[in-house]
Image (cartoon, rainbow, N blue to C red):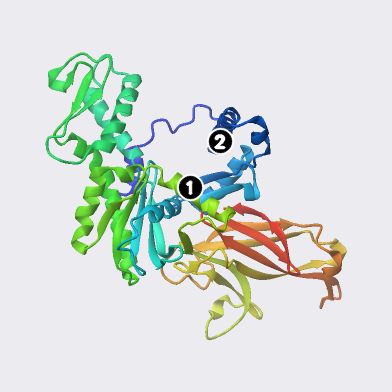
Amino acid sequence: MSSTDLANQYPDAKAALADGTRNPERMTVDFLTALRKHVEMVMKHKLPTSVYLTTPIEYIITVPAVWSEAAQAKTRTCAEKAGMGEGAALHLVSEPEAAAIYSFEVMEPHGIKIGDTFVVCDAGGGTVDLISYRITKLKPLLRVKEVVPGNGLVCGSIFLNRIFQKFLKSKLGGFPTWDDEILEDAVKRFEYVKRAFAGTAGEVYEITVPGLDDCESMGVRRNKFQLTGSDPRTIFEPVIREVKFQVMRQVNATETQGFSVKAVLLVGGFGQCGYLRDSIRKMVEPRGIQVIQSANGWTAVARGALMKRLASAASDYPIVKISGRAARKHYGVLISKDFDPNIHDIEKRGTYQIHAMEWFVKKGETIREKNPKRLKYFSEHLVSDGLPHTFGVNIHKCCNTSSPPLYEDGQVEPLVTVSANRPHLPIEKRQRIMGKDGKQYYVLTFFLQITYLSAETVYELIFKNQNYGRISAEYA
């Protein structure tokens, strides 16, 4: 069963919006606005007014690694609209990366050596993200590198709640006094079961069902329903099976590249579940792989995200360093190239040139924040049309694991249109040439600088060796 099957079989009963005029982005802005106001209120109560008014505030938002670039960009936009700042005052961090930073920081250093490889499994409420890290340096600071593209799916513990709801309705929905309020109370109690269930024989859990009459045959007594026998396992198994599949998929991908996995490191709220831990352990132990539940796994993501930002603000702050990430997709642009009969298809040839893909990032390639990509572009505009102010570039993606295609075909998808409106570019630096048609043209040479951060991509315009800052990106 895939995460798509889980979502289809156990849909969110509250997913439909009550008011058709409100979309997910608007609701996200409303939620983040309320969260920001609450934070500000608490800080005003806790800090002297003078301190509060003079203290710069930055917001760090963690997002699942499986989210698309478009989802990451929308999250930033919503946070900005919610008043959480913009630019350098707002940070997006990958959840499994944040969890890894904290978990490696608190891990017992004895027994860790250069070359050890760990699969970090961040199992949360909504998503399960997996990333493989290899230890590249021990002193003075621990350094790790992402060695293969991560994977993950929407198969978190929220599906346990949905399966439990369906199960309980099938058992008790026939009671005359059954209603949604009883179900909500039962789900709250089920949160304890999710943490405590170990999969051992004889486990019994009592679920509060206020308002239901005693019925021994239905397992209801004194407003409580007993989960016994195989019932808990039946609820857990569909989700556990999917998580195990994703873990093994990441382990296999890592070992296929020649890296021996030492341990699976479990983080996140769902990652603290004993039954999940033991199920993964039974699966990987025959291959000599350990399973470790991180200390403070429930809050590892938040702790790691804060540590990452503190280290960026203060270079002397000790922290585990992520020296490189593995690209999850191929990224490229469509350009005109001189026709080469040894490479290109004659049927796709134009008069002298051919349109073909230029892939500037290959899937699995190590990308580093300190080494942004720079793409060189030429822009021509008729002088008679006035000074050119706007420049645009279309970037494409390909998710295939094999080599990306040479031409724009069904495997190639539009990713983002990057555009810059910069009327203040220095006029004297806009070169003029005479075209073959006898008309004058402005010819501009500029660079698009692309920096891949933890959970977002920054596009900047470079003109005449000057950085004109972040430019807009409209995702497909």
User: Percent x, y for residue 344?
Assistant: 54, 80
Label 1 Cα crowd, 10 Å radius (few <14 / some 14-19 / many 20+): many
Left or right, residue 57 beside residue 300: right
Residue at (54, 37) in percent of width and height? 28
Q: Is residue 370 left or right of residue 272?
A: right
Q: Amino acid at mark 1?
A: Val
Seen from the viewer's position, the closer of residues 469 and 381 is: 469
Residue bearing mark 2: 32
Residue type, label 2: Leu
Q: Is residue 314 left or right of residue 405?
A: right
Q: Is residue 369 above or below residue 38?
A: below
The answer to whether residue 396 shows anywhere in this view is: yes
Q: Which residue is mark 1?
A: 63
* Image disc number at residue 204: none
Q: Residue at x 28, y 58 (%)?
A: 248
Helix or strand or loop: what does disc 1 sit on?
strand
Q: Position of residue 258 (x, y in %)?
A: 33, 72
Helix, strand or loop under label 2: helix
The percent coordinates of residue 358 (x first, y second) are 57, 72
